[in-house]
Amino acid sequence: MKVLICCESEIVLHVTGMALEAAGHQVVLEREPHALVAEAGNAAALLVDAVRAKQAPPLLRDRGFRGRALLVGDGTQEELAQKAAELKLDGAVPSSPPEDLPRRFTAALEARRRVLIVDDSEIVARLLKEELEAKGFEIQYAPDAEKATSIILKRQTRPDLILLDINMPKVDGAQFCRFVKKNEMFRSIKVVFCSGEDKQKVEKLVTECGADGYLLKDELLGKWIVDNAR
């Protein structure tokens, strides 16, 4: 796994880098965020200290970084997690003791991913929720684009992935997808259409709206459920 590390402290930078490199990760170390721009596109994670936390993640996300941004530093897991939330990061990794750092890093990456289901059918949403929770995801639900917008605007509730219905009242899925994809604030969110529409229509909308992919409800949930809950 390719890991970017950006810290003001040379000690934290190199101790963290050596620990992760020893665990088999490909590590890129830099004190200045701009020096990591060329590495951003194919990196899976970014470790930053509190000094670099406000500058590095938004800069690298703007240049194609799609991984998790984690705070690294001295302190307990609880203290760092609270600080990470304040800095709008995805998690935290205590830097000490260094010999156990790879395990803590892996645990931070494997923390429950958050999925937002946006669908005006409560039946479909409930079935999707049960399926995804069984696989370890944290699930949020919005019956329409207005509620979904209020969820993604807050960093503490912002999802990693949106499963988005297409046919919804007021603002449809295509419109909402375009809104998400055109807003720099939401660059880290993946949008996947989850629809009962014809496959060709969904594929066309994926291209037109910049979505990250699609799932067909009849393949996921069965044609009878889709026909009765559309």
Image: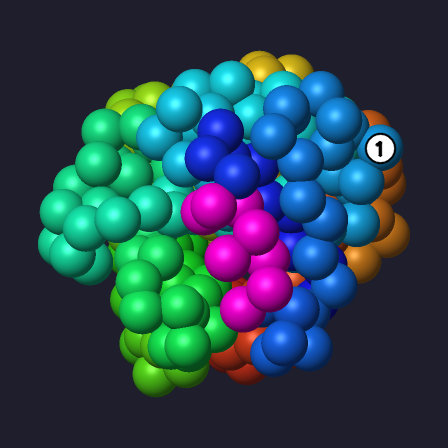
Q: Secondary structure at mark 1?
A: helix
Residue 204 as seen in the image, left or right of residue 37: right
Q: Which residue type carries mark 1?
A: Ala
Mark 1 neighbour density, 10 Å: few (under 14) some (14–19) many (20 or more): few
Q: Residue at x 38, y 47 (%)?
A: 72
Q: Nearer the viewer, residue 76 or 88?
A: 76
Q: Quadrant of residue 223?
A: bottom right
Q: Which residue is mark 1?
A: 38
Is residue 164 something that shows in the picture?
no
Q: Is residue 72 magenta?
A: no
On the image, the x and y values in percent for residue 139 come to 31, 59
Residue 28 in percent (x, y) is at: 72, 49
Tell which of 64 and 38 is nearer to you.
38
Q: Is residue 18 magenta?
A: yes
Identify which residue is drawn at 65% across, 55% down.
Answer: 3
Majority secondary structure of magenta residues: helix
Q: Residue at x 56, y 26 (%)?
A: 56
Residue at 63 percent of width and 24 percent of height: 32
Residue lying furthest front: 11
**Which stretch is magenta?**
11-19
Q: Residue 133 location in percent, x, y? A: 32, 75
Between 101 and 206, which is closer to the camera in this rendering?
Answer: 101
Q: How is the image coloured?
A: rainbow
Image spot of residue 13 (x, y percent): 53, 45
Q: In the rendered image of this protein, does residue 86 appear above or below residue 19?
A: above
Residue 64, compared with residue 203, is above or below; it is above
Q: Is 139 situated left or right of 175 in this image?
A: left
Q: Quadrant of the N terminus?
A: bottom right
Residue 134 seen from this side:
yes
User: Relative to 142, is 116 on the left or the right?
Assistant: right
